[in-house]
Each structure stands twice: as structure tokens, then as C-alpha cells.
Amino acid sequence: MLLQLDAVKTNNEAALLVFVGVFMFGSLGEVFVLKTTDRATGVPALLSKFDLSDYSGKQVAIKANFNSADPFPASTHLDTLRAIVETLKGAGASGITLAERSGMGNTEEVLEQMGVLSLSRELGFDAVVLDDVGKDGWVKFDRDETHWLRGFYMAKVFHDADKIVQTCCLKTHRFGGHFTLSLKNSVGLVAKKVPGGMYDYMWELHVSPFQRQMIAEINSRYNLDLVLMDGIKAFVTGGPEKGKAVEPNLLLASQDRVAIDAVGVVILKMYGAKGKVGEADVFEQDQLKRAAELGFGVKSADQIQLTPLNSESQAEVERIGQVLKAQVAMH
């Protein structure tokens, strides 16, 4: 393994690249990091690091975090959603659909209270309440080698979309997930009950001792093109709807949901998260360990590349990089 720290100049601004475990023969899970409290400029700046021309003429599905009608960081900040939609529309996306199933409240009421339905009318994107979708709007995935006793159903809008973009928050999870970042946010695109059926898939998930593994297994069944994590604030206790809030003032983005979740876990550790999140190594966290077993995303800390967008982000990247480096050294 090679660890290196290089300073480069981009557009006359200092940018720092921290490569954690650069292998000459391997690809890296790159995570862009931006220190900011300004979503209106920060979100487009992050998204500009990806080839948005590939979104031109495409149908895009968005999975945000509207599990309840509680304010950020419990739920996606409306300014983050606005900036994502405006950027995708500016890139020429032919259609944008946000689809959601809330776990702690009536989904339509949650979307109304959080301003999502009003924003959808203003910006011209579709907002789909997955509770109201008929049986033909779901795709069945069999149990196969998963911990799901009956398999599960995923919303067809995500199965059929040309591109999938997710925006998640940064927080712990007191109901068995340990943390709820990108991987856990995917639970909201799975059916609780399929129309005409009685079986409660969310009951199964939340009582299972394999809940965290099941979360990773959901993610192994769909492609995710881009994820943006809003870590301007975070919960380091409790979660998902309330807890002790801290202010990392960070926005992050990646095409690798495992890499960005690993970095999110590091940030939660840095800000004092306890329990399994604080105590266990990053890739010994059940969600990430199972993801590595399933073979999507990075498999270890030494495959993560951290790229700060400005000089203000440099110190944060160095701190995160040191934790990841320590994780590598222990294995």
C-alpha cells in the first residue's frame, strides 16, 4: 500500500488530494469533500465534479431522505433538494422523479409538510408517494443468498430509471441500523406491504438480527449513479428523527455509496458517536462489511480517495484520512 499527500492547483485555487491506499492496478472510491454551509453554491460545485453531460436526455430518479416530517438533519434540507434538481435540469435531464416511502409518518403528509410537493410544482419534477403505487409499480427480488426471508419488492421507478441520484443525511440510528447514511436511505425505496398482500417487509427488517446485512442486500440489487451526503449538521446520538446535533459543515459526494458511507462513519466517530459506530472499525460495521461481501463499492479503507474541493476542506480531509489510515494499519 502506498500513502501519499499531494498539493495541486486547480482554477487558481488550492486543492488537496489525499489518496488512501493507492494501488497501481486498482480503482478508487473517490469521495469529494467540501467545507461549507452554503448549499446553493456547494451542491452544484460538488455535482460539477461528475460528468453531468451523461444525464442529458435521461430519466432520473431521486431518492431523498423524507422518513419523517422532522427538520434537517432528520430529513433532507429543501435547499439541498432544490440545488440537486436545478443542477440536473440544467444538465438536460428529460425527466426527474422523486419517489419516497416514509417510515415514520404518512408519506404524502410528510412530503407536504417538508415542502417537497410545493417544490415539485415550482421546479417541474414529479413527486411520487410510494404508498399509493399499485402492485405493478413494484419489482420482486427473490431471497436468493440474502437474509430476507421472502425477498423484497423495490419501487419500479428506481428499477427503470436511466439514472439514480440519492441524497442522504449524516446521522446515527437507534432502531438497529447503527447509522443511517446512503445504504440505509435505500430502505425507503422498498415496499412495506405490496398492494393486495398482508406481509410487512419493514416489520421483518426491523426485528431481524440481520437488519444491517439486509440493508446492504437492498443496495446490491440496484445501481446508484451518484450520492450526495449533507453533513452540514449531523446526529451523533439517537436518530433517525432526533438526537444530539453537531455541525461538521460538510457536503460530500461520490459515485460509490460504500465509500461515502465509510467516510460518513469516520465523521460520526470524529464527532463523538458511541456504541458500535464509535467502537468498531469502519469496515467491521455490519452494513459495510456485508456490502464488501456482496462486491459492490469499495471493500476496505485503503480503496478510498478523498478529494477536497477547496483549501477550507483540507484540514477536514486530513483528519478523515488519518482515521482511515489508522484503520488500514490495524489490518
Image (spheres, rainbow, N blue to C red):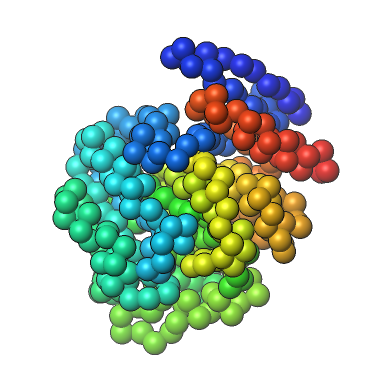
- Residue at horizontal 38%, vertical 41%? 39
Q: Is residue 51 above or below residue 165?
A: above
Q: Is residue 4 left or right of residue 104?
A: right
- Residue at horizontal 60%, vertical 24%? 17
Residue 113 visible here: yes
In the picture, residue 317 is in which quadrant? Answer: top right
Give the quarter of the figure containing the N terminus: top right
206 vs 24, nearest the viewer: 206
Q: Is residue 162 above or below residue 10?
A: below
Q: Position of residue 112 (x, y in %)?
A: 26, 66
- Residue at horizontal 38%, vertical 76%? 105
Q: Which residue reaches farthest bottom?
A: 198
Q: Is residue 152 left or right of residue 44?
A: right
Q: Is residue 266 above or below residue 205?
A: above
- Residue at horizontal 57%, vertical 53%? 246
Give the quarter of the figure containing the C terminus: top right
Residue 256 visible here: no
198 vs 90, nearest the viewer: 90
Q: Position of residue 97 (x, y in %)?
A: 26, 54
Q: Which residue reaches farthest right?
A: 330
